[in-house]
Image (cartoon, rainbow, N blue to C red):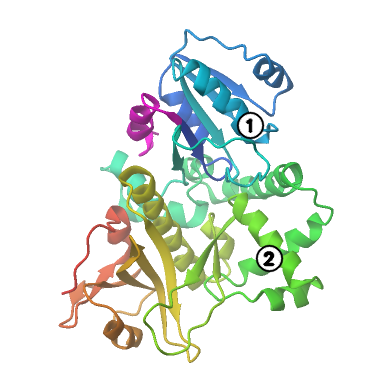
Amino acid sequence: MERALEPFVLQDLKQKLVLLTGPRQCGKTTLAKQLTPNYDYFNYDAAEDRVALLHKSWDRHKQLIIFDELHKMPQWKRWLKGIYDKEGISPQLLVTGSAKLDTYKKVGDSLAGRYFQYHMHPIDLKEFMRFNPKANSAEAFATLWQCSGFPEPFLKGSQVYYKRWRRSHLDIILRQDLIELQTISDIKAIETLVELLKQRVGATVSYANLARDLERDPKTIKRWLELLENMYVIFRVIPYAKNITRGLLKEPKYYFYDHTYAENNPGAQLENLVACALLKEADYLNDVKGIKTELRYLRTKDGKEIDFLILQDNKPTHLIEVKSKDDKPSNAFAYYEKYFSNVKLLQLVKELRRETTYPNGVEIRSLVNWLIKVDLGCASKG
């Protein structure tokens, strides 16, 4: 299917290098090859392609050259900078990768001023319904819920197929990509860490507690979590504390790019699914619009919690609560609203009879309907 980032990537390829990163098998290579039929493709994982890249031998009469997994090349930024500075973008140059491009520390010269970067995500409800407006949104949500938004299992629509796919997907990341990224000797412990994180989706995570469970030191746990972030297995949401007087918890929360990892806890899975949609929209605003957009959460030590707070250009714009059935406004809104002005107060409910609003600005909205249009644009209270 067509992907939402395609027109923006096409436009930017006329001006600069484009770097496209995101989770393994989220559709980066497919998108790259859909941009034009006139391309030359090289995957650094293939030995023959590594030889071609060493000799810089590709068809310069093609419109587009795609370098896949190039970040695995030693000093790849310096190599790419040399090509750009000498040859420019004729042909156009697109680099894709399934690890964060700042993961490799000793990468040579900077590419500053020479590229635009895009963060690609799995399919969400907004993207699917945009290109399939006649589709049944409830059925699309059910497929997303059961099969994740990764294109292959999502488009198959089979939960059995998805579960088989998921097993090999994570195994490749941990036993192939991660070993190439870092010298890791204790893969089984990292697999156990992933299992522990599945049980903690939506909850604050203590490095000390994880260290005790895994019989490792907290620094090791933190390093492993950073590796899983760099490989796009999980993403971290940290608390927001500015201008709030009472003590807030400082520990982060972790979510999976594949929300079904929390399938044993439907409430946590729902929160993870929304977190994925919000992060995807935040990355879109950052990458396409240049609006600095960040995802945070609020939780005091005595349990007053808001699932998500959205920051745009360092200013809070949205407080968002996620509920399965509860159509009564969360008491946390009344506590936190005094700390924020001109902020949209949203409670997203999966099973909702009717949408309502309240005098203090709280909006109770259908979660599925809201996810179809996910709009984090300029917000105002009331």
Does the CB distance between marks 1 and 2 fall below 8 Å? no
Q: Position of residue 307 (x, y in %)?
A: 42, 74
Does residue 69 show up? Answer: no
Q: Nearer the viewer, mark 1 or mark 2?
A: 1
Number of numbered discs visible in the structure rendering? 2
Horizontally, is 311 left or right of 235 in the view? left
Provide the residue designation for mark 2.
222
- Determine the secondary structure under disc 2: helix
- Report which quarter residue 287 is drawn in: top left
Identify which amino acid the numbered label 1 is placed on: Trp
Between 269 and 177, the one nearer to me in the picture? 177
At x 70%, y 78%, the residue is 209
- Determine the secondary structure under disc 1: helix
Query: From what the image shows, is residue 136 above or below residue 320?
Result: above
Identify which amino acid the numbered label 2 is placed on: Lys
Q: Position of residue 45 (x, y in %)?
A: 69, 29
Q: Position of residue 55 (x, y in %)?
A: 67, 13
Q: How far apart are labels 1 and 2 at the CA level?
A: 27 Å
Horizontally, is 280 left or right of 191 in the view? left
- Report which quarter residue 355 is drawn in: bottom left
- Report which quarter residue 367 is drawn in: bottom left
Between 120 and 3, the one nearer to me in the picture? 120
**First along the sequence among labels 1 and 2:** 1
Query: From what the image shows, is residue 108 above or below residue 334?
Result: above
Q: Position of residue 248 (x, y in %)?
A: 48, 84
Quarter holding the N terminus is: top left
Q: What is the span of residues highlighted in magenta in the rendered image?
A: 1-17
The numbered disc on residue 76 is: 1
Query: From what the image shows, is residue 48 above or below residue 181?
Result: above
Horizontally, is 139 left or right of 190 in the view? left
